[in-house]
Amino acid sequence: MRVETGREKEKSDRQKNHFEMGSKRRFIATMECVICAGPLTYRYMEVNSCRACAVFYKRTIASKSLVKCKSGDENCLQVNPTCRLCRFTKIEDLLKKAADNSTLMIPQATSEKEVETSTFISHESHTRFRIKNRAQMQDPKSACRLCRFTRMNEILTNASGDTEMKLTDDVGGKKASDIETSTFINHESFYECEPSTSQTPLLDKLRKGYSLMCLIRHGGELGTRTKVEEAMEIKSGNLILVPATYATFPMHGKTCKEAMKAFANHTFEDFRELDEESKEFIVRTSHGVMNSLDATYRSMHHFPGNDEIRTPGYTTYVRAKEIERFFADCPDDVDTVKIAGQVSSSNLAFIKIVKDGDFSEIRKSLETSVSVARRYYRRIKPTDYEFLALLGLALWNDEISNLNEKVLKIAMANRALVMRELHSYYAQRGISNYAKNASRLHEDFELYRLMNLFKDYLDKNS
């Protein structure tokens, strides 16, 4: 009997592992297109649609051509192959149903050969959309154009509502639910339970750290709040916001910086190990960007349809048209010369304008800054995890390179880790064009880095 040599055994093991990995990959790719039931690796157009169906739908819309059903009854998706008319109609119907905030479910395949895709939006009207066939044998390109297009239209409409996708990950068929849907993060989020397991632990730490930052700011600002007229209070959920003033702004600035330090200490072990001088430098250089990001994030939640309001503090707001109120308690003996040595020339001009009693320029600047920030924010509509990633990048900003090489290496490593976890976040959600999202996030980050509305001598005194 021939004895297997060590080299042959090693080769055999490699082949076995390769076969097992291949089988695993085939098992993972059990999602299928909800239009044509073909195999699906990446989602297109924010629904479980294959590339062929997505391209077909877009070209049909662009060409505005008339499509006809092959079977004549405009319901040929139950047979193979389907026609263009029925395919188009099915997509269109699914899109219309989304207004009811329906649920689109893609169940796990029962076998490798047979895949059943069930799309249910109401109890009755969707029996005809139940597909049961062999995905490997169906050619989406030969489908009926109308039925294919209609179904695609329906699915996209469904996805525009609060659609939920039931997907499976690569670990024993478990649900890919490690990352929750996007929810607003505030001081109350600190008391929420943390996930027992996660493929993005740093993003989860960022979430917990940011909620801790909100909790500290909330308590600190309430402790220094003075009584204001009830008519000037604005309630948003359980939070009551009051007008920001010149006198309270420095105190709120100090609280914010301490809260930022707590955020960094909780999230990054590397930050905890730094000396106090380095920590102060990092917080000081990142305060402007993080404050702009945070203010836009919260003002978009509290005042989604009001672009004239900004939230400079966690519990305060300011309106551009009421900027005089912000400086109502500003002392008359403000030393402009002293301020000049602590702020940039642009901020010096700002103070001079205020001293002369002319608020038109600062009002215009405030309106423009808030409008631009919100326009960019609406453009990408970041989820809470994308917002947290921006905060993490803002903390480890480029100015850290001025400190020392050791801290620069730490910053670069943490920035890379944030981007890797953001990549994992997109992958778990089946977003294939995440590079476009990341590019837009980078553009927004640069915008907020350049935009620091209240960067004046108060930063230096706080």
Image (cartoon, rainbow, N blue to C red):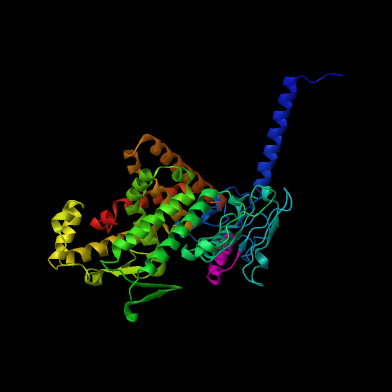
Q: Nearer the viewer, residue 414 or 106?
A: 414
Residue drawn where x is 33% and y is 62% of the image: 252
Q: Is residue 222 above or below residue 43?
A: below
Left of 13 or right of it: where is 184?
Answer: left
**Can you say which quadrant of the picture contains the C terminus?**
bottom left
Left of 288 or right of it: where is 456?
Answer: left
Residue drawn where x is 87% and y is 19% of the image: 1
Q: Position of residue 277 (x, y in %)?
A: 35, 44
Locate residue 192: give its quadrant: bottom right
Q: Nearer the viewer, residue 72 or 300?
A: 300
Left of 69 or right of it: where is 314?
Answer: left
Magenta span: helix, strand or loop, mainly? Answer: helix
Q: Position of residue 111 (x, y in %)?
A: 74, 50
Q: Position of residue 320 (x, y in %)?
A: 26, 68
Q: Nearer the viewer, residue 231 or 135?
A: 231
Q: Position of residue 65 (x, y in %)?
A: 48, 59
Residue drawn where x is 44% and y is 45% of the image: 271
The stretch of residues the image draws in magenta is 86-103
